[in-house]
Amino acid sequence: MRTKKIIESKNALRLGFGPRSLAFSLVEVVLSLGIVTFCSLTLIALIPEGLSSNKASREQIIALNLCRNIESDLKSTASTTNSSPLYGITIPAAASVPTTNVTTLYDSYATSANSFSTTRSSSSQYRFTVTLVGPTTSSPNDPVNAKIQATWPPSVTPVAPSSLGNPTNTIGTVNLDIAINRFGS
């Protein structure tokens, strides 16, 4: 009977069920530490990428909101006037040949809300290029087409790439294309 117990305990040790199987070997510990370290370093390396993506998103949202302010100013302009009420943007009148008006504005976002100027100040964060193409008739079906482009930093004059798209020398760009019905419906 005693020999049977000894044989069973040897078989149990061989199969990994004995008291020796309760601990991890040094190789297993080192391997698991390596995997945990690799995973932790990968997650830590993603933090700067997430922060820069968050900053870019914030910049785009602010620029788009400021573009929407310019859009609201253009759309609130009465059909009897050719200058927007808040920012003084000249809107082209109807002509047989479409006329184009380009206005460059700089924000004062850091110093005051909803304020734009034609000159860049030290507090400007964005440059806005407003391109308006006048209609060929006074028909309500022939609106003024506007392209509002926000770029940053404001000190850089945007250089368009060879193909259509965003400027190549800016950090960020937001484009807003709108049609303004100035002659009623």
Image (cartoon, helix red, strand yellow):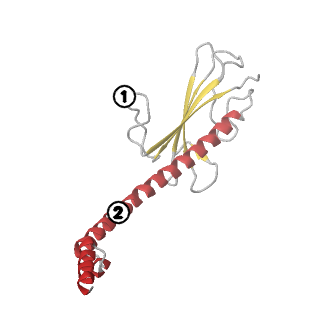
Disc number at residue 162? 1
Q: Is residue 15 above or below residue 67?
A: below
Residue 39: numbered disc: 2
Local packing at callout 1 (Cα closer than 10 Å; few below 14, some 14-19, many 20+) is few
Q: Position of residue 47 (x, y in %)?
A: 41, 60
The tally of labels here is 2
Measuring 64% from the left and 52% from the top, which residue is drawn there?
Answer: 113
Q: Residue 96's image quarter?
A: top right
Please state which of residues 155 and 3 is positioned toward the viewer in this rendering: 3
Left or right, residue 71 beside residue 147: right
- The amino acid type of the residue labelled 2 equals Cys
State whether residue 11 is above or below residue 2: above
Q: What residue do we see at 43% from left, 40% from top?
A: 157
x then y, percent, for residue 10: 23, 78
Q: Earlier in the sequence, mark 1 or mark 2?
A: 2
Image quadrant where one finds the N terminus:
bottom left
